[in-house]
Image: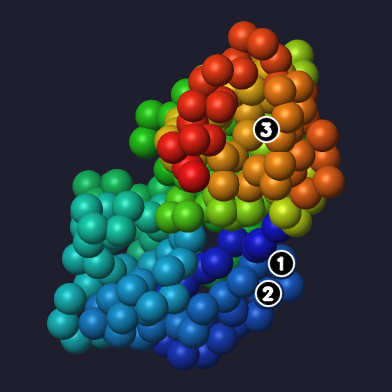
Amino acid sequence: MSPCKILIVEDESLVAMDMTDTLKRLGYEVLPSAMYYEEALVQLDTGKPDLVLLDINLGEGKTGIDLAYVLNTKYQLPFVFVTSHSDRHTVSDAVAAQPSGYLVKPFDADDLFTSIEVAIANFAGRKGLPQAADAGVRVNDSIFIKTDRNFVKVSVEDICYLEAEHNYIFVHSSNGKHIVRSNFKDFMVNLPVEKFVRVHKSFMVRLDKVDGFSYTDISIKGHEIPLSRMYKDDFLARMNRVQ
């Protein structure tokens, strides 16, 4: 399980340093901050953040609002405007850029934490994902799964198989097990469906994680997963294509 990776775009270095310290204490991973529009573009391409904290005023040149439109169109990332301005004109311009949150300076650690978690949930709502807060939020190559306190990041590449039980799915990954309130149909919106196959009414497996199989069972990292008659032919056909 990896922490949410955050990029700060802020032209005041002391403010950026303070935010970085706070975010690290809250358990997030923080990329080197960017002060200007062009510098932020470089960090977006190289650092691949999961969320951006974005100041509206970035000194000379293009503003945070200019960058916001790029985040929406090219990168499709959640972002929170962080600014000392709350006048109607600024707020109106900011809302038009469709942020996932808006945080007014000064703020404390609780405000920052809440803004980030709400932004991730809002971003899922904007994408129109079914049961977004429960089924998970896909950002880049990871899924953010809702827990009691916040969202946790799970790499899609680490997911080995899914186990359904009543209204819940257990996500078994290389780094542990996570539980999410959802069903296969809704949860698979977040995953590359061509890499997964149903093998039982309660199980889906990732094809490239299969270590071995028989006509009744599938082995993945020491775990035995039942292969039912209903899904056996599809599984065998898909495995043949993998080979």
Q: Earlier in the sequence, mark 3 or mark 1?
A: 1
Element type where label 2 sits in the image: helix
Which amino acid lies under the numbered mark 1 shown in the image of this protein?
Gly
Q: Residue 97: x and y, percent?
A: 24, 51
Q: Is residue 14 left or right of residue 217?
A: left
Residue type at numbered disc 2: Lys
Q: Residue at x 61, y 18 (%)?
A: 232
Q: Is residue 5 left or right of residue 151?
A: left
Indicate left or right for 146 with 221 as reference. Answer: left
In the depicted view, which residue is nearer to us: 20 or 204? 204
Q: What secondary structure is marked by label 1?
A: loop
Residue indicated by mark 3: 162
| Residue found at the very far left of the displayed protein | 61
Residue at the extreme bottom of the image, as rendered: 13
**Closer to the camera in the image, 234 or 156:** 234
Q: Residues within 10 Å of mark 2 (few under 14, many from 20)?
A: few
Instruction: Give the spatial CA distance, label 3 vs label 1.
Output: 27 Å
Residue 164 point in image, percent of width and height: 71, 22
For disc 2, the marked residue is 24
- Are the residues at dot 2 and dot 3 in contact (C-beta closer than 8 Å)? no
Quadrant holding the N terminus: bottom right
Query: How far across and down, in percent of the image, does residue 2 sit?
Result: 66, 62
Which residue is disc 1 drawn over? 27
Mark 2–mark 1 Cα distance, whole angstroms, equals 5 Å
Nearest the viewer among 128 and 115 is 128
